[in-house]
Image (spheres, helix red, strand yellow):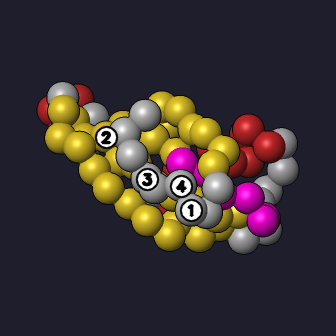
Amino acid sequence: LTPSVKTYLKEVIGEEPKHVEITEASSQLVNGTNHFVKVKHDGKTWHIRLHEALPCYGSELTVHSHREVTDAEPLTYF
């Protein structure tokens, strides 16, 4: 998941993040898999939702959405 998260952060913030750490993760099985990750980067904390397509659809991993949160905020579905 980390390469996809790093690429997404670079696109959103407009520069290569200096440090990216996934501190928490969960998943939800749907028509593929939704991955929810808590990410710390450059002093900020984000929750990022990624979708991994089923193998019959190429297993493509794409970022669905994100939100900036506090360190204390639990990782939940969004």
Q: How crowded is mark 1: few (under 14 residues within 10 Å), some or many (20 or more)?
A: few
Q: Which residue is drawn at 43% across and 65% down?
A: 24
Instruction: Please give the range of residues in magenta.
Output: 42-47
Amino acid under disc 4: Glu
Q: How far apart are marks 1 and 2 (CA)?
A: 22 Å
Amino acid under disc 2: Asn
Q: In which quarter of the image is the N terminus?
A: bottom left
For marks 3 and 2 on the same chain, the one whose residue lies earlier in the sequence:
2
Amino acid under disc 3: Leu
Tag 1 residue: 72
Q: Distance between the residues labelled 1 and 3?
A: 9 Å
Q: Quadrant of the C terminus?
A: top left
Quarter assignment of residue 45: bottom right
For marks 1 and 2 on the same chain, the one whose residue lies earlier in the sequence:
2
Circle 1 or circle 2, nearest the eye: 1
Q: Which residue is drawn at 73% across and 48% down?
A: 10
Quarter assignment of residue 61: top left
Determine whether label 3 and label 2 are within 8 Å by CB: no
Determine whether label 3 and label 4 are within 8 Å by CB: yes
Circle 1 or circle 3, nearest the eye: 1
Does 60 sit above or below residue 31?
below
Q: Is residue 24 visible?
A: yes
Q: Is mark 3 on a helix, strand or loop?
A: loop
Amino acid under disc 1: Ala
Tag 4 residue: 73
Tag 2 residue: 34
Q: Distance between the residues labelled 3 and 4?
A: 7 Å
Determine whether label 4 and label 1 are within 8 Å by CB: yes
Magenta region includes residue 43: yes
Q: Position of residue 7 (x, y in %)?
A: 63, 49
Q: Which residue is drawn at 84% across and 50% down?
A: 15
